[in-house]
Amino acid sequence: MTETSAMKMASQTRKTARQTWPGRLRGEPAAAAALMIFFVSAATLAGAWYFQLVVGLPPCPLCLEERIPYHIVIPLSLLLAIAALVRAPAKLLTVGFVAIAIAALCNVVLGSYHAGVEWHWWAGPTDCTGPLTDLRAGGSLLSQLQSIHVVRCDEAAWRFLGISLAGYNALISLLLAAIAGCGLSARKPA
């Protein structure tokens, strides 16, 4: 085999490697970061649904609010991965990663607040931590008491290693913000 044909084969091998998904992702670290955000976010939201539907832990109002950023981050990260793979302008990638980082950091704050409410470090919202105040609204007192089922925000339904689901949400959201920061620094200028 001649040196020229060996160089052609090596070049062809590199082209083929770049055309596979792992090869393309190695060449586009911003797309890899966006896909990682997508999969971590989707797995986290699927885990929340698993705890709700399979394990039987109904979410409190704060838990439901903590899911909102995932509904923003999941489609945005998928679109961002596609944009990075088709070599969209760097400004578009910057805006996308900044939006993901902001949503994730807002969820860090909300998850930390919720975990603090569970540890009774501060008061939570009155709709899920305060006492029942208006029992005169309609019907008899006994029927109202039997029909009320409030999922309390100040009681952790599940803990692992001393950390509640709200605490894990804060940690996962912090990880997502860090990955978005990596994607922001890894993007290539157009």
Image (cartoon, rainbow, N blue to C red):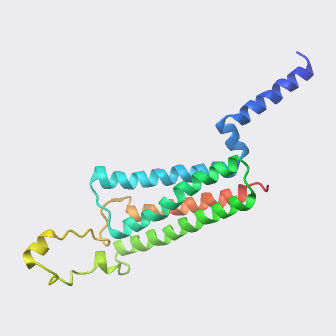
Q: Determine whether 27 is above or below 1 in the image.
A: below
Q: Position of residue 39 (x, y in %)?
A: 52, 49
Q: Position of residue 184 (x, y in %)?
A: 69, 60
Compared across the picture, whether 36 is left or right of 136 comes to: right
Q: Which residue is at the front of the view, 115 or 77?
A: 77
Residue 180: quadrant of the picture:
bottom right
Asked if residue 164 can be seen in this view, the reply is no
Q: Residue furthest top?
A: 1
Q: Position of residue 2 (x, y in %)?
A: 91, 17
Q: Quadrant of the N terminus?
A: top right
Q: Residue at x 28, y 71 (%)?
A: 152
Compared across the picture, whether 43 is left or right of 52 comes to: right
Q: Position of residue 37 (x, y in %)?
A: 56, 54
Asked if residue 112 can be seen in this view, the reply is yes
Q: Determine whether 107 is above or below 80 in the image.
A: below
Residue 177: quadrant of the picture:
bottom right
Q: Residue at x 92, y 22 (%)?
A: 4
Q: Which residue is at the front of the view, 116 or 14?
A: 14
